[in-house]
Amino acid sequence: MDSMQAYLRAKAAEGSPQRVFDWNKAAEIIRNQQARHAGAGLSGDWGLTGGDIFRDGKPVPKEDTYVYLSSNWATPELEVDGETIDCWVYETDELGWDAHTYWPPSALAILEGRSPAQGDAKGDRQP
């Protein structure tokens, strides 16, 4: 998708609720599938928004990737083991999650087999 198409879709969706990537769901899927690699991006716009989030069995440091995972028109997605899965919540559903959230402590806790309550939903936004 080119920039003009993305702009027009965003304008048409003004006022719609913002969808953000669901890091806790992604962590559960990665852990349950014992994935070694995973990526994330926005449907229809992976070329500009997608990137690796999990590589060689561990979270990719924020400075080593690029993802933009919030939209009012595109669906945040997780790609793991060749399968692309819708993976989002409304921005108002999770405390403080937005386009800049990256591996919040609650998701890191899930990856480690701990309860998400053992991590703070906001916390530092990178591993």
Image: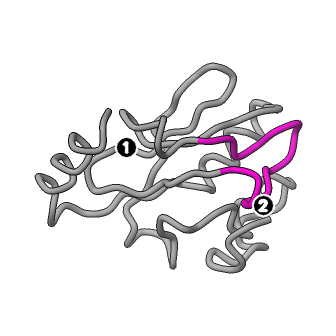
Residue 17: name its quadrant: bottom left
- Tag on residue 96? none
Q: Is 121 displayed left or right of 87 in the figure?
A: right
Q: What residue is pinned by disc 2?
A: 108
Q: Residue at x 74, y 70 (%)?
A: 105
Residue 75's mark? 1
Magenta span includes 122: no
Residue 6, above or below 68? above
Crowding near pointer 1: few (<14 within 10 Å), some, many (20+)? many
Give the residue drawn at x 70%, y 78%: 120
Residue drawn at (49%, 40%) of the image: 77
Q: Which residues are magenta?
A: 51-65
Of badges 1 and 2, nearer the viewer stands 1
User: Where does the image place residue 127, in percent across and percent down from the top left?
Assistant: 80, 65
The mark that comes first in sequence, 1 or 2, is: 1
Q: Amino acid at mark 1?
A: Thr
Residue 66, horizontal then vertical, whole percent: 62, 51
Q: Is residue 34 left or right of residue 48?
A: right
**Rendering coords of residue 19 (x, y %):** 37, 57
| Foreground residue among 45 and 91 | 45
Disc 2 marks which amino acid? Leu
| Element at label 2 | helix
The quadrant in which residue 81 appears is: top right
- What residue do we see at 61% from left, 56% from top? 23
What is the quadrant of the N terminus in the image?
top left
Measured Cα–Cα span from mark 1 to mark 2: 22 Å
